[in-house]
Amino acid sequence: DAKTTQPTSMDCAEGRAANLPCNHSTISGNEYVYWYRQIHSQGPQYIIHGLKNNETNEMASLIITEDRKSSTLILPHATLRDTAVYYCIVLSGGYQKVTFGTGTKLQVIP
Amino acid sequence: GAGVSQSPRYKVAKRGQDVALRCDPISGHVSLFWYQQALGQGPEFLTYFQNEAQLDKSGLPSDRFFAERPEGSVSTLKIQRTQQEDSAVYLCAMRTGNTGELFFGEGSRLTVL
């Protein structure tokens, strides 16, 4: 699976959009981009995934660049409860283990 | 994660003791994963079951770690002769279908003294 690179930490003001970047320059054509988050003392939570089109659900939006070498997870109106570690993961189809890196620690500031 | 129940939530063991951690999965989910998460790190893959078959145990750190899922439902992760470096949160996860969408339990925090 392709490796991903994320900033170690980010701050975001409450109510503003949080934009979390991820680089995956070695992604191959059949690999999806997945995002998870982990709130303190809880298990990771699936957020969203995409292949090449932008995706949106009730939690977030995922913007994938045309060359697919990077993506951005957008939380449109960050709240204090969005403070968490966010993991960007690249996976191909079929069985495989989901491999987490160290993620981005997002701190939402009041 | 709703539907994935892990027990105990907290376990303190003396070095050298054996421990068993239990995962009660979402009914009907075929795939089950165990992960280990050390403090400040991301979760690390340990092992994977499809029904009762353990198809991948490449992440188990030593032969002191053993996982089973005899009836394809409840799974137990056993650690023999615990060491201090085994202190971590152990997470169980289920997968829907053949995607990368996993549902995690809240984990069992093991502290080895």
Image (cartoon, grey):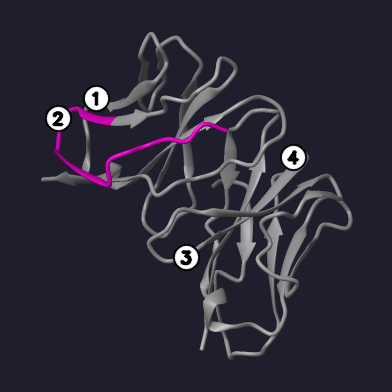
Judged from the image, the secondary structure of the residue bearing numbered disc 4 is: loop
Indicate the amino acid at tag 3.
Ala
Q: Chain of mark 2?
A: A
Q: Chain of mark 3?
A: B
The location of residue A21, given as percent across then percent down, is 29, 30
Check if mark 2's residue and mark 1's residue have beta carbons within 8 Å.
Answer: no
- Left or right of A3? Residue B3 is right
Q: Amino acid at mark 2?
A: Arg
Determine crowd level at label 2: few under 14, some 14-19, many 20+ residues with C-alpha closer than 10 A: some
Residue denoted by label 1: A76
Viewer-closest of B8 and A8 = A8
Q: Which residue is mark 3?
A: B38
Q: Main secondary structure of the magenta part?
A: loop
Q: CA distance from mark 3 to mark 4?
A: 27 Å
Please give the range of residues in magenta: A1-20
Check disc 1 and give the amino acid type: Pro
> Which is more toward the observer, A27 or A108?
A27
**B106 over A92 or under it: above or below:** below
Q: Amino acid at mark 4?
A: His
Verify CB contact (< 8 Å) between mark 2 and mark 4. Answer: no
* Label 2 and label 1 in one chain: yes
Q: Are marks 1 and 3 in contact (CB under 8 Å)?
A: no
Q: Is residue A61 visible?
A: no
| Residue B83 placement (x, y as % from top left) | 59, 83
User: Which quadrant would residue A93 be assigned to in this image?
Assistant: top right
The chain holding disc 4 is B
Secondary structure of the residue carrying numbered label 1: loop
Residue holding disc 4:
B29
Please name the residue shown 51% across and 89% down the image: B113
The CA distance from mark 1 to mark 3 is: 31 Å
Callout 2 and callout 4 share a chain: no
